[in-house]
Amino acid sequence: MAAETTAPPPSSSLPPPAAAAAPRHPRLSGFGQLDASVKELTSSQAELLEKIQKLKQEVQNWRSNVETQVRTCQNELQGLKKGLDSEVEQLKLEMEEIRSAIQEEKGNLPAQITNSETSNNDTEQALQTQDQALKVDTDASMEEQTATQP
């Protein structure tokens, strides 16, 4: 309880505040330094904002160029795709024509075989007839030779 009995010293015995004791000139020089720092920071901020704006513009230009290139490539690819699609369709038509021709040839094959067999038979008959005619001529020629000999 002894601590409670000690009272703080009266306010008149306190020393004056440090700011009040210091002369006015150092206080103003602190503000001057602060003002210089603020000006420097403002200048740096302006430079940074300018750099940011330039970078934004560069990025915008780059993006625009990339988009232009992408559109150009897409247009080229679409043209190539159309060309390839056209060629594929042409090839499909040609393949269908070839298939039809093959099917037609397959259908004609039995008739061709029959015609070939008929032709072979006709050829054989013609050869037999020719052989017989030669035989008759040869026989007639032999008879003449024997008739003319004494």
Image (cartoon, rainbow, N blue to C red):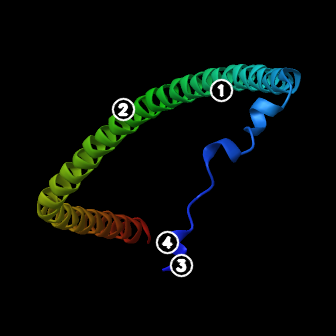
Q: Where is mark 2, residue-wise?
A: 82
Q: Amino acid at mark 3?
A: Ala
Residue named by callout 4: 4
Q: Amino acid at mark 2?
A: Lys
Query: Dot 4 surroundings within 10 Å: few (below 14), some, or many (20 or more)?
Result: few
- Asked whether 117 or 43 is in front, the reply is 43
Residue 84, x across and y down, in percent: 40, 38
The answer for how far apart the CA atoms under marks 3 and 1 are is: 68 Å
Q: Nearer the viewer, residue 12 or 76?
A: 12
Q: Quick check: 12 above or below 107? A: above
Q: Which residue is mark 1?
A: 52
Circle 3 residue: 2
Image coordinates for residue 127, horizontal then vertical, percent: 27, 65
* Sequence-wise first label, 2 or 4: 4
* Residue 100's disc number: none
| Real-space Cα separation, disc 3 to disc 4, in angstroms | 5 Å
Q: Nearer the viewer, mark 2 or mark 4?
A: 4
Disc 3 packing (10 Å; few <14; some 14–19; many ≥20): few
Q: CA distance from mark 2 to mark 1?
A: 44 Å
* Residue 52 figure quarter: top right
Q: Nearer the viewer, residue 62 or 119?
A: 62
Image side of residue 40 versus residue 80, left or right = right
Query: Closer to the camera: disc 2 or disc 1?
Result: 1
Give the mark nearer the N terminus: 4 vs 1: 4
Tell me which amino acid carries mark 4: Glu
**Who's the residue at 73% across and 38% down the image?**
17
Q: Position of residue 100 (x, y in %)?
A: 18, 50
Question: In percent of the image, x 77 and y 38: which residue is there?
Answer: 18
